[in-house]
Image (spheres, helix red, strand yellow):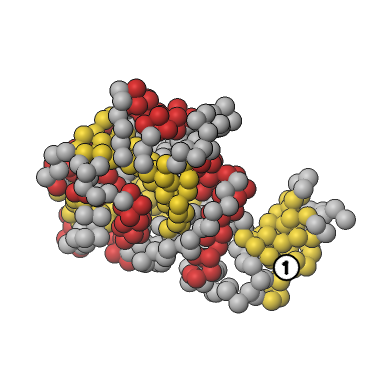
Amino acid sequence: MSLKKNEIISLHIDSLSSDGNGVGRFDGQAVFVPFSTPGDTADVRIVKVCKTYAFGIIHALHTPAPCRVSPPCPIFGRCGGCDLQHLDYAEELRAKTTFVADAMRRLGFIHHPVLPCLASPLPERYRNKVQYPLYADETGAVHAGFYAARSHRVIACDDCLLQPALLNDITREACAVLTRLGVSVYDERTGQGFARHLYLRHAVTTGKVLLCLVGNGRTFPGMEDFCRALTQRFAEIDSIVLNINEKNTNVVLGPECVTLWGSGVLRDEMAGVPVALNPLSFYQVNTQGANLLYAKAAEFAGLTGSETLLDLYCGAGTIGLSMAHQCKRLIGVEIVPQAIEDARRNAHRMGVHHAEFHCADAQKAAAMLAQEGLRPDVIIVDPPRKGCDNTTLRAVLAMKPKRIVMISCNAATAARDAAFLTENHYEINTIQPVDLFPRTKHVEVCMQLTRTESASNQFKRIESHKS
């Protein structure tokens, strides 16, 4: 029997998909239901019917699963941020372990055991960065919130449970000050108005905060009053920066920042590496979780002090530099010039003189280094969500490292890339998910691969591997 839109069916939820939806089956057809959980039995209203599957929403929950909890956030389900607040945290970790194992099996044909997902030290209040879009109500008062899923409609949020309470307090006060000063809010439909986003970064090691106002212009009325009011109210604010974004775009940050108060940078430490951050710097959003991830990566690297370590997609160098005192030579590669400048400064602050950082595309740099005869003992790859491209992986193979440590925020592309490596002289030793993004569907994975001579000398999957 084919399903019809608006039909209400009784459905038992059996599993979670990797996008966080519960999955049940009705007459053999998969039905995806947001905000449901394995073990739920519910009446589900069908909202979209496709050829082999359908989507539904919970109409009435009859038997809640034992792992279901009452979401602590009042806007859960309307805000586009969290996906899994309706699960207890232990079940969330089990689900994320399954997400990784399923991706490995289905997309990489990898049947190696996946270790249980490591818990974030903080399942709530863990984010060191927040970007709040702003909007004005009918009275002109300024408010902050988050975009509803798949829309640009802002849902008001006074206290996001993923952010430290301090950042939420500063945001509320900043909105009140903007309202008092009569600062207009940007309207993306007309391109008019000034204040677009509030962007805050929090240094976990010092407790200091960098506040960035993203504006549609270079100045706004009461700029000095804005800085004075917030710094007098919050001693934790270390710098206030104006980011200039005058383009009609949904990209949050513009290319230029102007310091309004303080030094314009925020100093912190991650995995023993001192960093200086501005609004444009890349930085893992979960400091304690990243410390856990980088410790696992160091364990997988197995450095003894005599090795050459190549860190591809190195960003500001944090991963490689966290292992700098365990290797003889460190080489980092990153395409973003500012990140490379940050990496060099970070190395200088640490007194690391055996590190070199190259600003180049990973695939071109890897190919060049391989052609030059570089033979690193260990290679770390931490690519963007799209994974490694074909040229990079071929260059990695040509350099014949003893070990490869693969870090990825996308289990699907990690499975694809690992499959390529396992058919070309490498075997997987360990697959370890790490929860850097509690209450969301996202999960990080760290893998250790070691070189073996048992495989064929031919690159078996070069033609089939897609970048």
Task: Decide which of 129, 326 is in the foreground and name it.
Answer: 326
Image location of residue 376, percent across then percent down: 30, 36
Image location of residue 172, percent across then percent down: 33, 61
| Residue at the farthest right position | 1
Task: Decide which of 247, 465 is in the foreground and name it.
Answer: 465
| Residue at the farthest front position | 454
- The structure residue drawn at horizontal position 33% and vertical position 49%, both measured from the top left corner, is 301
| Mark count | 1
- The structure residue drawn at horizontal position 60% and vertical position 50%, both measured from the top left corner, is 105
- The structure residue drawn at horizontal position 48% and vertical position 61%, both measured from the top left corner, is 115
349 w.r.t. 26: above or below: above
- The structure residue drawn at horizontal position 83% and vertical position 59%, both measured from the top left corner, is 27
Q: Which residue carries the number 1 mark?
A: 12
Can the viewer see residue 363?
yes
Image location of residue 438, percent across then percent down: 44, 62
Image location of residue 209, percent across then percent down: 23, 56
Task: Decide which of 334, 210 is in the foreground and name it.
Answer: 334
Can the viewer see residue 137?
no
Residue 144 placement, left or right of 351: right
